[in-house]
Image: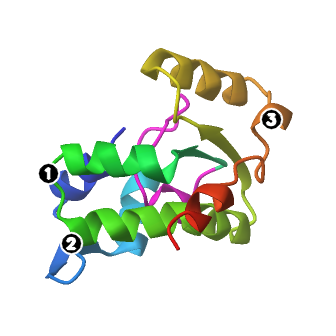
Amino acid sequence: MELSRIIKDKDLLGDFDEARETYEVDVEKLDMEILELPQDRPLILVGHLSHLLSVHLVIILRCSPSVLRKRLSGRGWSESKVQENLEAEACDVILIEALDSGLDVCEIDTTKLSPDSVVDGVEDIIQGEREKYAPGNIDWSEEVLDWF
């Protein structure tokens, strides 16, 4: 389930942050909405705020900054928004936040994977394969050094 859809459907968009070109979201209200969803089957939440919610497992989809630049630019994102996302990916921002939460965390390098291969990885993790996807196996430092 896309968090952006829940945020829009439940009218959880806050003020627009012009500098970051994004809306603010009250994560506590979003979490309450998530907890109201039926709990009769597993639910996969998709979005950059997932690791801040009441979840049991976090799977972070990673991408090489150089490939990520092409993908985000191809979506028509502004250079400043692309750069913010590249820096966050290069510095492991979401990974660090997720690890700080104390939740189980896995990560998949999607750089060279097809969508079906990413789904296979997610399914592996859900079925218990965690070692292959353990945090810390993805390192963009060599690529980032080329920025300087």
> Whole-percent x and y of residue 103?
72, 58
Q: Quadrant of residue 70?
A: top left
Q: Which residue lies at the image location 75% right of the left edge and 65% below the top edge?
A: 102
Circle on res. 53: none
Please state which amino acid type lies under the numbered disc 3.
Answer: Arg
Left or right of 29, for residue 130: right
Toward the viewer: 144 or 21? Answer: 144
- Kindly tell me whether residue 95 is visible in this rendering: yes
Q: Secondary structure at mark 3?
A: loop
Quadrant showing the N terminus? top left
Q: Which residue lies at the image location 18% right of the left edge and 72% below the top edge?
A: 21
Up the image or down, 104 lies above or below 13; here it is above
Please state which amino acid type lies under the numbered disc 2.
Answer: Tyr
Q: Quadrant of residue 99?
A: bottom right
- 30 within the magenta span: no
Mark 2 is surrounded, within 10 Å at the Cα level, by few (under 14), some (14 to 19) or many (20 or more) other residues, namely few
Please state which amino acid type lies under the numbered disc 1.
Answer: Gly
* Mark positioned earlier in the residue sequence (3 or 2): 2
> Whole-percent x and y of residue 123?
62, 22
The structure's colour scheme is rainbow
Toward the viewer: 74 or 11? Answer: 74
Determine which residue is flagged by label 1: 76
Circle on res. 23: 2
Q: Secondary structure at mark 1?
A: loop
Segment colored magenta:
36-55
Determine which residue is flagged by label 3: 130
